Image: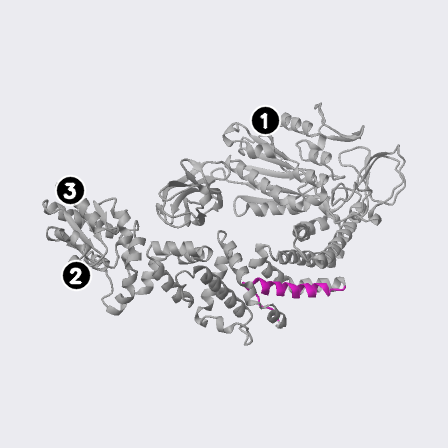
Amino acid sequence: MVDMLIESLIQEFDAYFERDAQHCTILWFDPKREWEGLLSHLKLHLPLLVYEGSLLELRYQLVERSLNECAVVYLPFEKLQLTTRGEAEYIRPFIYTAKVFDDSIETVLRDQGVELPESHTKMRHIRPHLPALAVASVGKGRAIWKGLDNLEAVLARLFPDFEDRLMQLLAYPEQAARQLEQQEQREAFFTLLESEFGVPGPEQGDDEKWAERFTATLCLVETFVAADEPDDFPFREALPSPVYWDRCRDFLRKWQRDAMLNDAFAQRARAVDGQYNLAPWVKSLPQPPTASGFLNVERAVWERMQESLGAISDKDAAMDFCRTRRATFRERARGFWAREGSLAGWAALARMAEVVVGAGDALEELSRHETASSLIERYTQRWWRVDRAYRHFRDQVNRGAGELDAARKWTQRIYREFLETVNAHFGEMVWQEGQWPPEGVALGAGDLWATKSTTSRGRRALIMVDALRYELGQELTAKLQPSPQATPDAALSPLPSVTAPRMAALLPGWSDFAVDYAGGAWLITAPGFKGNIADKKGRLAWLKHRLDSVAFFNLEEWLKTPLEGVTKGTEWIVISSTEIDAVGEGAGPVTWYTTEVLLQRLEQAIRRLLVLNCAEIHVVSDHGFLLREDVRESDKVAVDVPADRLLKRAERYLLLRGPDLPATDLPSLPVSGSDDLVAVFPRGIGCFFTPGPYDYMHGGISLQELVTARVTVRQSVAERPVSVALELDAGPEIRNAIFKVRLIPQGVDLLSRARRVEVDIASKGQRVSQTWEAVVNRDVVEKSLRLSSQMGLSEGDAIAVRVWDADTGELLAQQPAVVQVDLDW
């Protein structure tokens, strides 16, 4: 699209040359340099000669041109008739045979029918910004010139991305200011800034210091207002007028949440922190400010909270502390310095409150649940959140969220009481009832194998995950929202809750399996099948035996397999994952934080299956697990069992063969699927031994071990991911190092589902940038991208912005562009 101004000049100059072939020179006088920003665009369409310091050189070029060769000579000074004698004499002879053009931008706009204010007062404010608007209008069409009836409209049109440009200015003051000057926008930009924030722009050369002062102003306003505008605020005189306070606070929050530039805020705020030490004042307040941009203020608030936490003397006080401050912890955890990492302890305290309050509620109502079924139901309704919160709490503590000794002590103590009390009660219920599972509740895979053939149900998938306890299944389901349709259900593990019996219970025909233990290993057989279903090889062979068409992968293989390599006729895709169990059994303390990464891998695996149009995906597991801080000697249960009667001694169960069992007062139950095997269990969360400092264990009777997740993911056969179009906010010329793109969903209807995408920048067909991730559903998604010097790009280089399907690697859209910015930042 050719800009209206450029097109009008081209038409006027071309028309002159066509009318009079003998007069082939136009002298273009622009004493205010209004048109200078458009010269690079006009050079593409006109025989343009530009004054660059020597009229003698221009005269030489005019004299030496061929006969009838046309030229437009740009002269950034008054018409020759108004100049003094001197160098101007070199060009004077051409004045008599050339057309003289000296119209201003305003004149050309009015000639083109653009409605500008007739008021001299309004035009006096608008006129200085027309050159900058002329540059900004390139490629935008005529619409950019409509409705310019006041200064505010001009500035808004000139800087539709004003806040983004301001953030860039604060991040890179010298470079961004130089860019504003090159685009003839500096004066207009700082005029708009002062009208928006009440803060004057910087003097020439003062850009860096100005950025720090402006950052301090934002932080002062935020602190003052969040503290309820106290009269004794130490820096009241540094605040702008109250009319600007909301604007300052809104922009500060946007800057703090900008993924591309919030690190610049942290740098600026740290630089001015010492100049505005408000910590003593904060500590003197009855209530601290609810928010602040200053790190010293946030640290003072944190120290106050630490003092309160350190004063807790008993469990009841810890409970009250968490109940009364739960909302405060959540709010502080969302603050900038908590998210940035300097005060990560707030997130840990928010998790502490979840654990303490949730555990307290569970213990208060425990006596109302008098059956194993009732306990399982309540656990799957609510109590599982305590396990999730504690896992996240310990993860954050282990990652170095400092000064949390007191928080860790009380959270650990109360969580341990929750585990001990709830599971001791649960174990007694199971033992008294004398059977597992409870009456009316099934083991295994439920109705997963209700029909043998998938012909009428479409392609299906089974993901068998070791140790996906119930709370992890809930978290996996949350990651999959809002699309596709994922339903988390509870499933029960056999006793003992270990891999071989439980994985077998997930298979078709489980009710016919015979479970035994011989030669130090589990033996699970099926009628007419020669393999041992207790091991993975046997389980896969059994599935191949029972299913019509099946392909097997482990999780790592599946994530690396090209989707086009999966045979179209395959009815079942079976994926196995042992990562959680392997990490837990190999290095217990690592389990606190690795589960999050493993859940992300499972999510990716599921989304790849959806791309293959799997009608159903079932995620199932063998057993759950307990995560413990440590195991005390008093937790270890001593049982005197003759060696010839003991088949296996594990952390959480003993395996014996009946019918005459050694006398013991510990819970014992038949092994699911066996004729004569019996397992003996410690009460609660006790154990028979540990292999060292060990946080992770399973095999016993506890809700965390026996209640596993079964996540069912469904999509309509006709459901399809949205198509995605790409639009560059800046157009085909990238004039700012940080620019926006829009990811636009296409053809959205009731059958459309979200698509995960990656955006990158390529040069000569090769990726030169990082990748930016996004999820496109039904709304337009905006992403900020950054060009950097590390990409090896120079001004004038051609690039392509590309969008890929994150699961399949399919190229969805791309847009070419030209770099028109200096990246040497």
Q: Amino acid at mark 2?
A: Leu
Q: Residues within 10 Å of mark 3 (few under 14, many from 20)?
A: some
- In the rendered structure, the answer to whether residue 79 lies left or right of residue 184 reads left
Residue positioned 43% across, 71% down in the render: 243
The x and y percentages for residue 425 are 78, 51
Q: Quadrant of residue 61?
A: top left
The x and y percentages for residue 311 are 73, 65
Question: Most extreme residue toward the bottom, as rendered?
Answer: 231
| N-terminal label among 1 and 3 | 3
Calculate the distance from the C-alpha at mark 2 to the C-alpha at mark 3: 28 Å
Q: Is residue 527 visible?
A: yes
Q: Amino acid at mark 1?
A: Asp
Which callout, 2 or 3, points to the residue nearer the camera?
Answer: 2
| N-terminal label among 1 and 2 | 2
Q: Tell me if residue 766 comes above or below residue 227 in the rendering.
A: above
Give the labeled residue for mark 3. 69
Which callout, 1 or 2, points to the residue nearer the camera?
Answer: 2
The x and y percentages for residue 290 are 57, 66
Give the labeled residue for mark 2. 82
Q: Amino acid at mark 3?
A: Glu
Could you say which disc has been placed on residue 157 in the image?
A: none
Element at label 1: loop
- Write the start and end of the magenta stretch as one range: 287-313
Residue positioned 52% across, 45% down in the render: 483
Give the labeled residue for mark 1. 548
Which of the two residues, 307 or 756, is positioned nearer the viewer here? 307
Q: Residues within 10 Å of mark 1 (few under 14, many from 20)?
A: some
Q: Residues within 10 Å of mark 2 (few under 14, many from 20)?
A: few
